[in-house]
Image (tube, coloured by chain):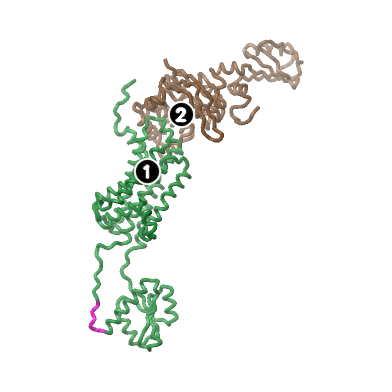
Chain colours: A brown, B green
Amino acid sequence: MDAAIECVDLIKTFPGKPPVEAVRGLSLSIKRGECFGILGPNGAGKTTTLEILEGLQTPTSGTVRILGKTWESHAPWLREKTGISLQETKLSEELTVLETVRLFSSFYQDSADPNDVIAQVSLESKARSLIGKLSGGQKQRVALACALVGKPELLFLDEPTTGLDPQSRRQVWELVQNYQDKGGTVLITTHYMDEAEKLCGSLAIVDQGKIIAEGSPAQLIKSHAGQTRIEVDFDTPPGSNWIETGLELSQMENLDPNHFVLHSSSLIESLPKVLEAAKKSGKTIQAIRTHQPTLEDVFVALTGRHLRDEGASS
Amino acid sequence: MSEISKKKSLFASPLFQLVITRLLEFIREPQAVFWVYFFPLLMAFSLGIAFREKPQEDLRLCIVQMVDETTQQSLKQANGFVFSSESFEKGLDLLRRGRVDAVVDPDPQKGKSRIRIHTDPTRPESALAKARLEAHLARANQPGLEPIPDVALGLGGLRYIDFLIPGLLGINLMGGGLWGVGYALVDLRVRKLLKRFAATPLRVRDLLISLAISRFIFTAGQVIILLGASWLVFGVEIRGSILQFCLLIGLGGFCFLALGLLVASRASKYETVNGIMNLVMLPMYVFSGVFFSAERFPEVIGPAIRLLPLTALNDSLRAVMNDGRSITTLGSEVLILVLWTAGALTLAIRLFRWR
C-alpha cells in the first residue's frame, strides 16, 4: 500500500533580499493510519512544509505524493480526501457553529452530517451559538469540525493547540486520537513536546528547514538524550565514593558534598542500587529526584537550543 | 470509492450555503444594515428637503421713508412683494445682508416723485425684484397694458430630487460593488478564510458567483427601498421603461462588482484596500455628477469625466428615469459600462490570489 504522504527533497525558497530558504531539502514518508508529528521551534519551516503537502504552496523543487497522487494532477480529488486546520483562521463570528459546519460540508461531494460532526467535537450544546461567543478552545474545535466534515482520509493540523488552556488542549488531543482510532492518518505540527509525545507515533524534529532527527518519541529520546538524571540529597556528606559507578550508571560532579547527580541509562536498574549504596554508607537520604529525558532534551542535545526560545544560542 | 458525484440538494449546494451565510452575516451586523439601507435614505431625505421646490415666495422690497406718499401708494399695489419702510442707510444695509431684495429711494437728481431701484446683482431674487417692479410701473403708467399671463411648466419639469435620486442610486451601486464585494473579499483574505476555502474542494467560480448573487440581493433591496421611499415622499417616478431601467441597474451593479473584484484581487491588508478604494471612488464622487451636473466642470476635462463608469451610469439612469429615453439612444454610455466591466473582470481574474 502507498504511503499516505511521501515527499522527497522539498525545497522552498521565498524570493527576497536576501532570499529566505524556508525549507532546505526535506524528505518524509508517512504511513496510512499513522499520526506523524513535525516538531520544531517557531520559524523552523514547519508551516511552509505543511502547506506544500496540503497543496496550498508549490515547492521550489522536490516531489510530493499524497495518497499516491500529486497536487498537479489530482487536486480536486485530493481536496475531497484531505481535511485541514490552519494555524489561524478567523471563522465568521456572526455565524453559528451549525451554520459554519454546514457551509463547509456543502463544499464536499461526500460529507458527514454536520450535526454528527458537531457531536464528535462535543459542541452539541453550542450548535446554535454564534462563533463570536465561543471560547478559544471551542473555536478550535469548530475548526476541527470543519476539517472533519468532509470525511477526510488524511488530516493536516497546523499547531492545533497553540494558545489553548490545558483542558482545551486535552480535548483536542482526544479528538485527534479518536480520528486516528477510526483509521485516519494525521500530520500535525507543533512546538509542544508533550503534544508530540502524547499524539505522535513518529516524529520528525525540524530545525532551519531540515529534519535533524526522525523516529518514534521513545527512539529519539533513547538515541539522543538517553540518560535519566537521578539527584540524591543526603543529610550529611557520605563521601565521594559512596556508590560504585558502572556502565549504566555514571556519577556527575557534585559541587555540594550533600548533593549528588547521577546519570543512568536505566532507571529501573539503577534506583535499587542507589538506595542500597546509600544504606551502606550509613547516611540518610533526604530527597531523591529523577528526571526522565524528554523531546525537549533531544532538541537541546541536537541543536544546543531550546524549542521555545528561538534565536538564543547555547 | 463510493458514488462520489451523488446529487446534492439545492440547500446543501455550496452556492446556496455561501449566499445564505453571507446574508445571515449581514443581517446580524446592525451597523452594516444601517449603512447599506438607511444611510442612502437619510441622504435622499435630507437633500430632498433642503432643495425642495419652494412655492414662489414674495420678494422683499424696502421703500425708503423719503419717497412721497402717492408714489409709495402706487408701488404698494405691485403683486408679489412684501414691503417695509426704513431709512436709506438701513435699507442698503438690509440689502447687503440679503434681508431685503431691493431698495427704492427718490432719485436725488429728478425730484421726489421719481425713484431709483437699488439691487444686489449677485442675487437672482434681486434682479427679479427689479424686473417685477419695472413691469408694474410700466402698467401703472399705461393703463391699457395687460399683464402677460404666466403659464407654469407642468410635470415635465425637473426638480432637484428627480436629479438626485438617479445619482444616489449610482453611488449606491458603486459603493455596493466596491465595499460589498471588494472589501468583503479582502476581509476573507485577511482572516485567512479565503486560504481555508482554497483547502476545500470549493471552486473559485462558486465563490465569486456567490458574492455576485448576494450583492445582487442587497442591491435589489437598496434600489427598491430608495425608489419606493422617494416615490412615496417626493413622487419621484421612472418615466422610461422599467425593464430598461432594471437592465441599467444590473449593468451598473455588475460593472462595480467587477471593479470591486479588481480592487480586491491582491490586497491583503485592510489599509491597502481602503486606500485603493478611496482612490477609485473619490474622483467619481466629485466628478460624476452625483449631487450636481457634471457639466458644471470645465469643458477641458469633460471627455475624461464622461469616460468614468459612474458618469456613464448616472447619465443613463437619468436619461431613462427623468427624460423617459430608451436605452437604444444611450449607446456610448452602455458601451463605456460594458468596457469597464469586461476590462476589470479580465484583469481581476488574472490577478486574483487566494492568499
* Quadrant of the image containing the C terminus of chain A: top right
Question: In this picture, which residue range is highlighted in magenta?
Answer: B142-147
Q: Is residue B27 visible?
A: no
Amino acid type assigned to the residue bearing label 2 in the image: Thr
Residue A50, image x, y percentages: 48, 27
> Which chain letter goes with mark 2?
A
Q: Is residue B274 above or below residue A75?
A: below
Say if the magenta span includes residue B145: yes
SS assignment at label 2? loop
Q: CA distance from mark 2 to mark 1?
A: 28 Å
Label 2 packing within 10 angstroms: few (<14), some (14-19), many (20+): many
Return the residue at label 1. B344
Residue B294, image x, y percentages: 36, 58
Residue A274 appears left or right of A164: right
Amino acid type assigned to the residue bearing label 1 in the image: Ala
What residue appears at the point 40 percent right and 54 percent down from the top-left corner?
A: B285
Return the residue at label 2. A58
> Which chain letter goes with mark 1?
B
